[in-house]
Amino acid sequence: MANLVTKDDYKRFKGLSSNGEDARIDQLVRSISALVKTYCGLSFIDYFSTDKTETFTIRELGTDSLFLDEQPIVSITSVKERISQSSDYTTLVKTTPFEYYTDDELGILYRVNDVTPISFPKGPNSVEVTYKSGYENTPKDLELAVYDLITYYLKSEHKKEQSIGSTTITNTNTTSISGDIGFPDHIRRVLDLYKVNII
């Protein structure tokens, strides 16, 4: 899993020259990269130049579209389907006759017969899709949110209260709908731009 930023990126952004916090920053870069990917439901940069293969179990007749785990779609390497567990996969084509097409931005794969929607075959692992997706580099707005999250944890701003000498500082955090402490608003706004909404 690729980190969304590097320690050196963060230190340049913050104008840091000391090496005293390098070990903590390295750990935070890894942890926050994983946290952001989990929260958003996307890998962002992991599959831009590396294929990801997903298999789909079609439970209902009439299913003519599939939501891929990653988006946006960069390219489709192959789409395969099979009518039973004992049969081989058949590779579909995206040229005449068109057997599928994609909404690249939303990461949706549609099964068609030229222009007419048709169903994927029903059954366990009846469809296999191999594709590339995401971004060559972390989007700049997301990068900024990751830097802010590193600072947020590095300075322990995620804690409700901090004591500095004889002074107690109370941090104001966002409260999620469930009542758990969430991300600060300015960070959440950026992350929510990329968050995949499960329908």
Image: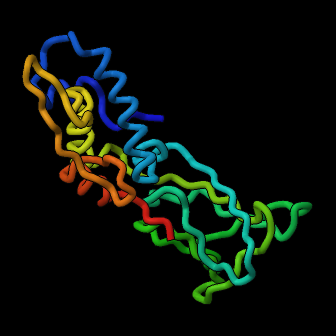
Please tell me which residue lies in front, 30 or 47: 30
Instruction: Using the image, determine if residue 32 lies above or below residue 140.
Output: above
Q: Which residue is drawn at 73% across and 70% down?
A: 58
> Would residue 41 be found to the left or right of residue 65 on screen?
left
Residue found at the very far right of the displayed protein: 86
Q: Can you tell which quarter of the image residue 143 is in? A: top left
Instruction: Provide residue 62's location: percent of width, then percent of height.
Output: 70, 84
* Residue at position x 49%, y 66% in the image: 198
- Where in the figure is residue 101, as x and y percent of width and height? 55, 74
Q: Residue furthest front?
A: 166
Residue 8's place in the image compared with 140, above or below, is above
Q: Which of 178 and 63 is in front in this view?
A: 178
Identify the residue at horizontal 9%, vertical 24% (top origin): 15
Res. 95 visible in picture: no
Q: Quick check: 149 above or below 183?
A: above
Foreground residue among 57 and 81: 57
The spot of residue 187 in percent (x, y) is: 23, 49
Callout count: 0
Q: Which residue is drawn at 76% across and 65% down?
A: 126
Say which of 121 and 124 sits in front. 124
Q: Where is residue 158 in the image (x, y as percent from the top left)?
A: 26, 36
Q: Which residue lies furthest to the bottom in this view?
A: 116
Q: In this view, does 81 lie above or below 157?
A: below
Image color mode: rainbow
For the question of whether residue 17 can be seen, the reply is: yes
